[in-house]
Image (cartoon, grey):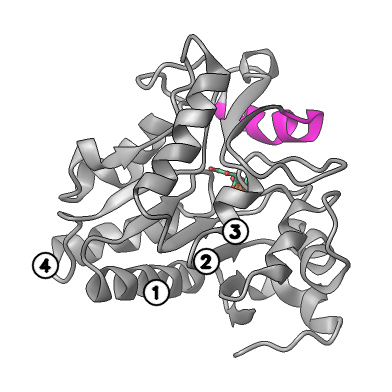
Amino acid sequence: MKIYKTENYEEMSRLAADMIAACILLKPNAVLGLATGSTPVGTYRELTECYRSGRLSFQEIRSVNLDEYCGLTPEHAQSYRRFMQENLFDHVDIRRENTYVPCGTAENPEEECRRYSRLIRELGGTDMQLLGMGHNGHIGFNEPGDCFVPDTHRVMLSAETIDANARFFASREEVPTSALTMGIGDIMAARHILILISGVDKAETAQKAFAGPVTPEVPASVLQLHPNVTLIGDKAALELLEASGVEMCR
Ligand code: F6R
């Protein structure tokens, strides 16, 4: 795992965007695995800037998102489809038909999950998977548990995740209680994984995930087993990890 420590969130976002841009320049029809949440917002802003200045095109890019809330339509203000439209897709030249997000309102969620894992395989797998990490170590919506679930599946969100995401809804009661998420196998099949971590409130979990044992109780710890992971974090998030003696590229 290569670990880059940055001064702050802005520098983390610029470096992440540079790495994604490099992936796109080397493979203009790459399959990007994308994430939502606060962490990648700055990265999407930087990528939009690269497009606006004519340095980058998304015309041939295909994208697969990690997850979607159950019960929210694509138009819902807090759906992850809408998040992607507002933070990236509407501002660059990606073709909407080449962007995939699990359907949170599918009549048969189990069938939708099977379709989504199949879709990822049919696209040839992801070239680069962008990830954030939850305070409890979740990646996608793979919450802490007894085992790693390989394929796209429906999860009940933990109370901690509902609390963390309540900030985006009018009240905690409005936060959906379940979601569809890529499984750990879908994520680990990516050729390159880029995980971003920002803020002192993630420092303890970052230490557990990357300096502790690999365990489904800290889902992000599974990334230690992937041969090509880049972690970019700001110094606040990486402080404890560095103190554990884990080497940083810079
Ligand atoms: C989002 C996702 C989640 C977030 C995680 C961190 O698609 O899959 O795993 O990456 O909850 O969220 P933020 O970035 O808001 O702290």
Mark 4, mark 2: which one is toward the viewer? 2
Q: CA distance from mark 2 to mark 1?
A: 9 Å
Query: Looking at the picture, does residue 106 appear above or below residue 42?
Result: above
Report x, y in % for residue 5. Answer: 61, 80
Q: Identify the residue shown where x is 43% and y is 47%.
A: 121
Residue type, mark 1 in image: Met
Residue type, mark 3 in image: Met
Q: Secondary structure under badge 2?
A: strand
**Residue most toward the top?**
107
Give the total number of marks visible in the rendering. Answer: 4
Q: Secondary structure under badge 3?
A: helix
Residue bearing mark 4: 54
Mark 3, mark 2: which one is toward the viewer? 3
Q: CA distance from mark 4 to mark 2?
A: 24 Å
Q: CA distance from mark 3 to mark 2?
A: 11 Å
Does the magenta run of residues contain 160?
Answer: yes
Residue type, mark 2 in image: Leu
Residue bearing mark 3: 188
Report x, y in % for residue 127. Answer: 40, 63
Q: Marks 1 and 2: in contact by CB < 8 Å?
A: yes
Disc on res. 19: 1
Residue bearing mark 2: 194
Query: Looking at the picture, does residue 147 appear above or below residue 27?
Result: above
Quick check: 28 left or right of 129?
A: left
Going from N to C along the chain, the mark reached first, 2 or 1, is: 1
